[in-house]
Amino acid sequence: MIANIYSWIFPAVFFAAAGMYEFTLALFSWVKHRKDSSRRVVWFYILISASIGILTVSAFFVDWSQVEWNLYHLYFGVFFLVIFYFGFLFKFILGFPLVVLLAAVVLLFNLYFQEWNPIGRDNPVATFRVLSRNNDGVKLELKSPGLPLRFSEADSSSLDLSFEIIKVNKMLFLSKESFYSRIIPLSENSSENSLLDSLLSWTESASFLLSRRIYTVTIGKESLLYKYAVIIEPEENIYVVKFDDFFQ
């Protein structure tokens, strides 16, 4: 998260908006011939300096040469600059409700992704062992990071496991990872989706902030009792490797 440029733009525009708010009050005090106009101008310079300082410090944590600069960075900054500025101007009408809304979004986002596993190119999304394979079907021991051990079985000689991948846009800088995965249960019914899942689906369809993809891997021909890893390269392929070979 600290290497995400949006993580630095967000607090920078917050201090910039606070500085603009102090400057607005300074102008108001100057028109009204109040004595606190000079003090507010000083605060304006302090807050603007803090905003510039945050962006400057970000250069030590973010490789700016690797950032694909585009208009979305500008849109992101301007959007929150305006929101924060009017939040300062109208604290009770907009400011406090905005704080509550942002807190609720962060809470819901983190609550939802508790059931998901952050993944990267070097991490398996699951490990498994084929416990038995005979005329009655195949039985599988399955383990996914952060989740309890589970067992799956099928009547056929192989079993299809589906994994859902969510790609999180960097604008959602509060997210610790860019990719999350979860195993789709064989008995999952779309009508059983939670309210949070429906909300996330709406966010995906209504914006570019989230995108989903389903991967399926067929398991059953692997050696009995040997540990295997399911690897997903986001937006590319899914494959199975022997666990020891994967870490060599």
Image: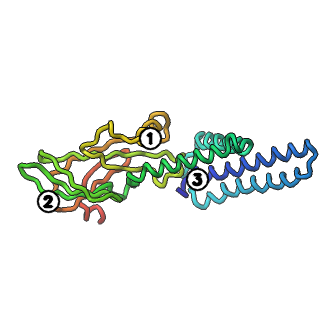
Q: Position of residue 119 (x, y in %)?
A: 39, 54
Give the residue displayed 21% in from the left and 45% down from the top.
160
Horizontal relation, residue 143 to residue 213: left or right: left
- Say if 54 sits above or below 94 in the image: below
Q: Would residue 196 be found to the left or right of residue 89 on screen?
A: left
Q: Position of residue 7 (x, y in %)?
A: 58, 53
Residue at point 25% right, 53% down?
240
Name the secondary structure under disc 2.
loop
Q: Which residue is mark 1?
A: 200
Q: Amino acid at mark 2?
A: Leu
For discs 3 and 1, the disc positioned in front in the rendered view: 1
Mark 3 / mark 2, whichever is N-terminal: 3
Q: Position of residue 112 (x, y in %)?
A: 43, 48
Q: Nearer the viewer, residue 82 or 230?
A: 82
| Amino acid type of the residue that numbered disc 3 sits on in the rendered structure | Ser
Instruction: Please report whichever mark, 3 or 1, sits nearer to the chain's N-terminal start.
Output: 3
